[in-house]
Image: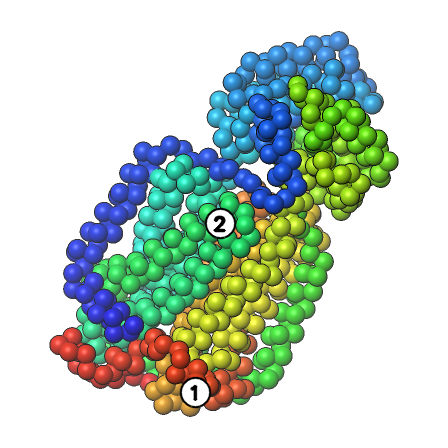
Amino acid sequence: MATFLYKLGRSAFRRRRLVALLWVALLAIAGIGAATAPAPTSGSFSIPGTEAQRAFDLLEERFPGAGADGATARVVFKAPEGQKMTDPAHKAVVEETVSTLKSGSDQIVSVTDPYTAQAVSRDGSTAYVSVAYKVNGMELTDETREALTQAGQNAQGKGLTVEVGGDALQTMPETGAGEIVGVIIAGIVLVITFGSLVAAGLPLLTAIIGVGIGVSSITALANVLDLGSTTSTLAMMIGLAVGIDYALFIVSRYRAELADGREKEDAAGRAVGTAGSAVVFAGLTVVIALVGLAVVNIPMLTKMGFAAAGTVVIAVLIALTLIPALLGFAGNKVVGRKQRKGTAATGDKPNGGTRWARFVIRRPLMVLLVGVIGLGAIAVPAASLEMGLPDDGVKPTSTTERRAYDALSDGFGPGFNGPLLVVVDGDKATADRTVSTIKGLEGWAAVTPATPNKAGDAAMITVVPKDRPSSVATEDLVHDIRKSTGDDVLVTGATAMNIDFSQKMNDALVPYLALVVGLAFLLLTVVFRSILVPLKAALGFLLSVVAALGAVVAVFQWGWLGSLFGVEQTGPIMSMMPIFMVGVVFGLAMDYEVFLVTRMREAYVHGERPGEAIVTGFRHSARVVVAAAVIMIAVFSGFIGMDDQMIKMIGFGLAVAVLFDAFVVRMAIVPAVLALLGHKAWWLPKWLDRVLPNVDVEGESLAAPTGEDTPAKPDLVKV
C-alpha cells in the first residue's frame, strides 16, 4: 500500500493543476446540484418493530387524513391575576384566535375550541387551543409557522398572556457565534503548530472543500433518498473533524520529510505513502463506526451514518490527492520562517513530546494508575444514566415553547405536556373495556372517552399522565397499559414513541459496540501486526467514552456545573447520545491511535528498542496529535453555546470525550502500557503473521528500490 500511495502522492504533486481542477469541478457540480434541488425535509421517521410505530401505522389505515404523525401545536392562554378565561371578553379573544388559526394554513388538519374540548383548567386561569397539522414539524412552510406565531401575538395584545408550544415550531438550529469561535481557535492552533499561515490554512481549506462537496451532495440527493435535514449537520460535524485531522497529519509529515533534506516531490510522495497509509486505515475505522449504525435498525439513523461515512471517504481522498497537489503550489511557504532560514530545530532534538514520553517510560505504572483511576471516577455517574428525548421543558425560559410548557404544567398538571394516545383495534365495546382497564391503573390524571372511526372498527383514547413526559412514572404508566390490555390495544404518541426509541437504542448499544470494536480490532491487528496493541486501543476507547458519558450525566442529568454550561433544566440524557458518542468518538480515537502508534511501530520495525520507539513516536507525532485534539475540542465546544438542549449536549459530550481520549488515554495510558509490555506489545503468533496481509503502513517498502521514481535517499526516516 505504501508504494501505491507514494506514487499517488508524487503524481498528484506533479499534476497539481489537473488534480486541483478536478476537485474544484466536483465542488461546483455538487454546489449546483444542491442549489437546484428541492429544499430537504426532515425525512420520514419510523421505528420498525415497536408498538408505537404499529399504532401510528394503524391510525394511518383506520383514521385516514387524521395526520397521525403530523406536527402539533398548543396555543396557551393565561388570564390576568384574579380573572378567568371564561370571562366573556377573554372568551371572545380565544374564539377569534381559533377562527384565525383555522384559516391560516392549508396544512392544518384540525383546531380545537377549548370551551367545547374541556381544555380550560379547573380554576379557570388557563386554557389552550390544540392545532394538528398534516405534515411533520420540519415540513411545515414558513407561512404556516408565521400564521401560528402571528395568531398568538395578536391575542397577546388583548390583555392575555399567550405562549405557543409544540413541535410545529421545530426548526433547524441556526449557526451561532460558538461554532465560528471554534473554527477561529482551530486556525490559531494550526498557526502555532506549523509556524506558517500557508501550512495552517491548507487543512482548513481542504476540510471546507470536503465538507462542501459532502454536504452539497447530501442536499442534492435529500429528496430522492429521503434524507433528513439533520443528516447534513452530522456529516458537517464529522467531515470537518476528520478533514482537518487527516490534512494536518500529511502536511506535518511532508514538513518532516523536507527537514530530512528530501526534494519536494519526493517528500510529498513519502508523506502520502506513510502518513497517508495511516489516514486510510483511520478513515476505515470511522467508516465502520458510522456504517455500523445500521445495526440499530432505524432508517433515519442508517441514512445519517451512510451519508456521514461518504463525507469521511471524501476527506480521505482529498488528503491523499488534493493535499499533495496544494503542497506543490505552496512551495517553500509551507514551512516556517525559521526552517526556511535553516535555523529550525532538527528532528532529533528533544521537544515536549520527547520529554513527556521519557517521563511516562520512567513511571509507567504510576501514570497508568492515575489515568485509569481518574477516568474511572469520572465514569461513576454513567451508572445512573437515564435515557429519553428532551422536550420543551428543557428549553431556555426565554423561549415561548418553554413558557407554554410551564403554563400547561401549572394549569393542568405536568402530564398535559405529554398525553398518551391509545389506539384500539376493535369495536366500541372493546374500547369501553379498555377505558375501564386504564382507569384501574395508577399514574393517570385524565382518560377521555373512546373516539371511534367512521367504520366503527377502531377507536382512539387519550390518556394524560400525572407526571411530566420524561419521568419514570410516565414510562411505568405506558408499560402498565401495555401489560394490562390485549394485543388489540396499542399505545403511541410522542411520549410513547420516545420511550420505545430509547429502549431500541439501549438494546442496540451492545451489538453495535461488539460490531464496531470487533471489526476495528481486526483492522488494527492488520495495521500494527499485534494482538495487544489493538486490544489496548479498544479498552482505552471504552474507558474514555464511559467517562465522557459520566460527565454528561453529571452535568445534564444531575445538574452539576449546569449553570456554567447553560443548562437551565435537568432531564434524561438524549437516547441517541451513547451510540452517537461511540460512533463519532471511536472514529476520532482510532485516528489518534493510528497516527501516534504507527510512528512508534515504524521506529520499532527499523530497529529501535521498545522504549526508544515510544520516544520517537512522541517526538514526531505528539505535537500534531495534541493540535488535532485541541482543534476538535474547540470545534465541538462551539455547539455548547447553542440554545437547543440536544445540540448543547452533543457538543459537550464530544468535546469531553476527545479531551479524555486524546490527552489521558492516547497521550498517557497508551505509552504507559506499551512501556510495561516492552517487546510483548508487538507480539503476533506466527500462524497469524502468515495469514494476515502485509499492508506496510510503516512504509518499509519505500526503503527498497522502486524504479525510476526511487528517492535518492534509501532511509525511510532519520531517527
Q: Amino acid at mark 1?
A: Lys
Q: Secondary structure at mark 1?
A: helix
Which residue occupies 77% across, 29% down? 430
Q: How many other residues sit within 10 Å of disc 2, few (<14), some (14-19) or many (≥20)?
A: some
Measure the alpha-carbon separation of dots 1 and 2: 39 Å
Q: Is residue 175 left or right of residue 643?
A: left
**Is residue 34 shown above or below 10?**
above
Q: Is residue 66 left or right of residue 178?
A: right
| Residue ID for mark 1 | 686
Q: Amino acid at mark 2?
A: Thr
Which residue occupies 20% across, 73% down? 266
- Of the numbered discs 1 and 2, the one sitting upstream in the chain is 2
Can I make out residue 53 in this image?
yes
Residue 591 x, y percent position in the rendering: 43, 66
**Is residue 410 shown above or below 373?**
above
Q: Which colour scheme appears in the figure?
A: rainbow
Give the number of the disc on residue 302. Answer: 2
